[in-house]
Amino acid sequence: MNRARQNIFNMIAAHTLLLAYMVLALFPVFIILINSFKTRRAIFRHPLMPPDTDSFSLTGYETVLKQGDFLHYFQNSMIVTVVSLFFILLFGAMAAFALAEYRFKGNSWMGLYLALGIMIPIRIGTVSILQIMVATGLVNTLTALILVYTAQGLPLAVFILTEFMKQVSNDLKNAGRIDGLSEYAIFFKLVLPLVRPAMATVAVFNMIPIWNDLWFPLILAPAEETKTLTLGSQVFIGQFVTNWNAVLAALSMAIIPVMTLYVFFSRQLIRGITAGAVK
């Protein structure tokens, strides 16, 4: 009886902590959303209050859709984020599988070398990256951003996925080899489905920095046709005057795909983070 009560208490405590975390995490998003539907005066006078009949306004959204090609910026951000995540997960999983499956001289050093990118920020090499992109003619192209973000996300992907790859049963992989499966078939058909929680974790951890990044789009792709959503939103922020209605509306529209992908990956993300924490 005492054990049952303890389990019930632990469950209630866990759900309470989860609810509190969700409230704290979503509160800034809630503030941005409600203020995006208010007049400029109401934003500054009552920032924590939802819009009413007097303060409700769609001026911000009208400005965003009329000024600048917001839908094109949105499309650029989606292309860069989705393609970068695809390459990060593909190449990261392949490298992790090789490090976890095949033992060779220098295996540990190779893993350490691939993980160094976690400790060394890629922005340190901005000047060199810009010179490379200029020399290859990739400035003001989405390809430049995809290459940079792929290189930026690979170290974390290799580091996380290698540990999960090591936990996959060797008996399962050997059974596949006995059945005549190639190494590629073992990788794609046997291993990858078992490490989906880790893949989702890597995707979420890389998705948000890519989607919200302003630095590399400003340096490598500032042209109108290659602007991302974050860079395109800066048109509403001036040195002396800022159109807060438009800024909040743009931020609200930019949050939608991130929240959608987060909800889509949430179950796999939680499994990936907590894997091995409870026996």
Image: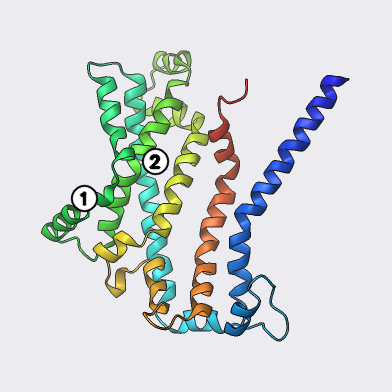
Extreme-right residue of the structure: 1
Q: Residues within 10 Å of mark 1 (few under 14, many from 20)?
A: few
Report the amino acid beneath label 1: Gly
Q: Dividing the picture into quarters, in which one does residue 138 lie?
A: bottom left
Extreme-left residue of the structure: 135
Task: Identify the image quadrant of the C terminus.
Answer: top right
Horizontal side of 219 relative to 29 (left or right) equals left
Task: Identify the image quadrant of the N terminus.
Answer: top right
Measuring 39% from the left and 16% from the top, which residue is drawn there? 177
Colouring used for the render: rainbow
Instruction: Give the x, y percent position of residue 133.
Output: 17, 57
Is residue 182 something one can see in this rendering?
A: no
Q: Which mark is residue 149?
A: none
Q: Nearer the viewer, residue 86 or 39?
A: 39
Residue hosting label 1:
125
Element assignment for label 1: helix
- As measured in the structure, the alpha-carbon distance from the residue carrying label 1 to the one carrying label 2 is 23 Å
Element assignment for label 2: helix
Measuring 57% from the left and 31% from the top, which residue is drawn there? 274
Report the amino acid beneath label 2: Leu
Is residue 35 something one can see in this rendering?
A: yes
Residue hosting label 2:
89
Instruction: Give the x, y percent position of residue 237.
Output: 41, 77
